[in-house]
Amino acid sequence: MNTRHAQIVFEPLVDDVLAAFSDHLERGGPRPPLDHLDSHDRQLAENLMRLMETGRGIDPSASAPSLEELLAGTEFMDAEGSVLSSGDVVNDRDDVDEGE
């Protein structure tokens, strides 16, 4: 199977900053300076660096947690630890008239 990855090419100065920032994240290298970039490239680099930081440590192949794990400890679990079904009614309000 031949897999191809999309590659986005930015201005060479922005590419250099992103490569240095990647080194910073992965190997603890110095955070790259941005003072040599014009305002447009600086904003682009800052946005992409923020995106790289946000995505750091996310495992795209990890499985999603189960519904029970997501709802554990919330009002959507019953006393036995099962997720309430759509037919279950949770009513802890005293002001609801049962005749309505």
Image (cartoon, rainbow, N blue to C red):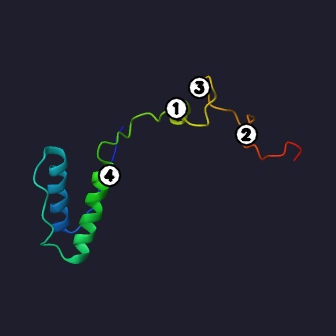
* x then y, percent, for residue 77: 61, 32
Crowding near pointer 1: few (<14 within 10 Å), some, many (20+)?
few
Q: Mark 3 points at which residue?
A: 81
Q: Nearer the viewer, residue 36 or 87?
A: 87
* x then y, percent, for residue 29: 10, 50
* x then y, percent, for residue 34: 15, 68
Is label 3 in contact with label 2 (beta carbons under 8 Å)? no
Is label 1 in contact with label 4 (beta carbons under 8 Å)? no
Residue 5 appears in the rendering = no
Front label number (3 vs 1) = 3
Query: What kind of element bears circle 2?
Result: loop
45 left or right of 100?
left
For the residues labelled 1 and 4, the Cα–Cα distance comes to 23 Å
Q: Mark 2 points at which residue?
A: 91
Q: Mark 4 points at which residue?
A: 54
Q: Nearer the viewer, residue 2 or 92?
A: 92
Q: Which of 95 and 56 is in front in this view?
A: 95
For the residues labelled 4 and 3, the Cα–Cα distance comes to 33 Å
Front label number (3 vs 2) = 2
Placement of the N terminus among the 4 image quadrants: top left
Q: Residue at x 15, y 51 (%)?
A: 24
Q: Earlier in the sequence, mark 3 or mark 2?
A: 3
Q: Which corner quadrant of the image does residue 14 belong to?
A: bottom left
Kind of residue sitting beneath label 3: Gly
Crowding near pointer 4: few (<14 within 10 Å), some, many (20+)?
few
Q: Earlier in the sequence, mark 4 or mark 2?
A: 4
